């Protein structure tokens, strides 16, 4: 596609519910990143994929967070047993190659846990 | 640990005035440096990258390795420059380039 697409745009979840957030990167982009942006803060790194391989998951805040990219294109970020502190905008970004080209970000999914 | 500081949460200037958004970083190695911008109701987008030595929309950013700063400057601000600006170093070299974002500076340019 022309850009990075994320769905849903908004998600309201009851505490304890599981959620799945989808990211469709730009076609052919090898690198895919997930970031979490809490209200009033800059985005914080969650995890990185190179094709289907998850090379860095050091930013995932707990074992309730899980990400996958099984075929090296679409990625899903899953949060189990959501908590209020998970409320944030989840951003996906993709890149064709080297980091110094910069990333293209999606519009994000705003998750609200009530 | 990598750290990025944008000391001004809010910055207001009048149209035509010079503007400088400050960024200081603490980073191991030789990071590559970026500025990202988010206009109202739009997605986060790359504004400029140090490696390209480019000027985008009249903005430039000078790297001062001694002070570990990468301030963003524009000599004459325009109303359409009003946005949230993020400084973001990334690990350089052969790394895939995980970005560390500052907290951001909201720039408001008044008519």
Image (cartoon, coloured by chain):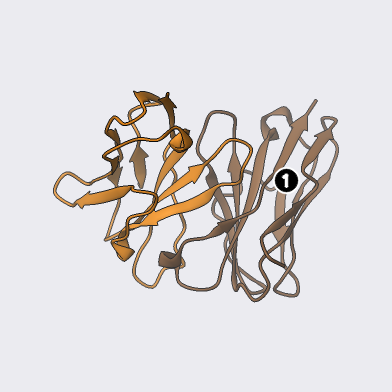
Q: Image quadrant of residue A110?
A: top right
Q: Nearer the viewer, residue A81 or B7?
A: B7
**Residue drawn at point x = 72 percent, y = 45 percent:** A64
Q: Position of residue A20 (x, y in %)?
A: 81, 50
Q: Colour of chain A?
A: brown
Percent across and percent down for residue B35 are: 40, 49
Q: Is residue B90 above or below residue A16?
A: below
**For the point 66% across and 67% down, which residue is it?**
A26
Task: Tell me which corner region of the image, top left, top right, bottom left or bottom right, holds residue A19.
Answer: top right
Residue B39 appears left or right of B79: right
Q: In front here: A54 or B68? A: B68
| Image-based side of B91 in relation to B69, left or right | right
Residue extending farthest left: B66
Relative to A32, is B58 on the left or the right? Answer: left
Chain containing mark 1: A
Quarter of the rendering occupied by the C terminus of chain B: top left
Total numbered labels: 1
Above or below for B72 versus B96: above
Front residue (pair A39, B74): B74
The residue positioned 29% from the left and 55% from the top of the image is B28
Place of residue A25 in the rendered image (x, y in percent of width and height, measured from the top left): 68, 64
Mark 1 is surrounded, within 10 Å at the Cα level, by few (under 14), some (14 to 19) or many (20 or more) other residues, namely: few
User: Which quadrant holds residue A38?
Assistant: top right
Q: Residue at x 31, y 64 (%)?
A: B51
The answer to whether residue B32 is above or below residue B7 is below
- x, y percentage for residue A43? 53, 42
Side (left or right) of B102 relative to A92: left
A3 or A78: which is nearer to us?
Answer: A3
Colour applied to chain B: orange
Q: Tag 1's secondary structure?
A: loop
Residue on which the image places disc 1: A64
């Amino acid at each position: 596609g022309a850009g990075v697409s994320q769905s849903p745009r908004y998600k309201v979840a009851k505490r304890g519910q599981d959620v799945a957030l989808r990211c469709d990167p730009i076609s052919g982009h090898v690198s895919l990143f997930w970031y979490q942006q809490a209200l009033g803060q800059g985005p914080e790194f969650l995890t990185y994929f190179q094709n289907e391989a998850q090379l860095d998951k050091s930013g995932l805040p707990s074992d309730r967070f899980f990400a996958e990219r099984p075929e090296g294109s679409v990625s899903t970020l899953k949060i189990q047993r959501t908590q209020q502190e998970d409320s944030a905008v989840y951003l996906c970004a993709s890149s064709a190659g080297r980091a110094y080209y910069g990333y293209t970000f999606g519009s994000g999914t705003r998750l609200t846990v009530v | 640990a990598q750290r990025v500081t944008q000391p001004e949460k809010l910055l207001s200037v009048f149209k035509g005035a010079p503007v400088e958004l400050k960024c200081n970083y603490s980073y191991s190695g030789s990071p590559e440096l970026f500025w990202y911008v988010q206009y109202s109701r739009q997605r986060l987008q790359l504004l400029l990258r140090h490696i390209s030595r480019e000027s985008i929309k009249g903005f430039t950013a000078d790297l001062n390795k001694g002070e570990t700063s990468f301030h963003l400057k524009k000599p004459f601000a325009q109303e359409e420059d009003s946005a949230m600006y993020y400084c973001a170093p990334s690990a350089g070299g052969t790394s895939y380039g995980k970005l560390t974002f500052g907290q951001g500076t909201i720039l408001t340019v008044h008519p």
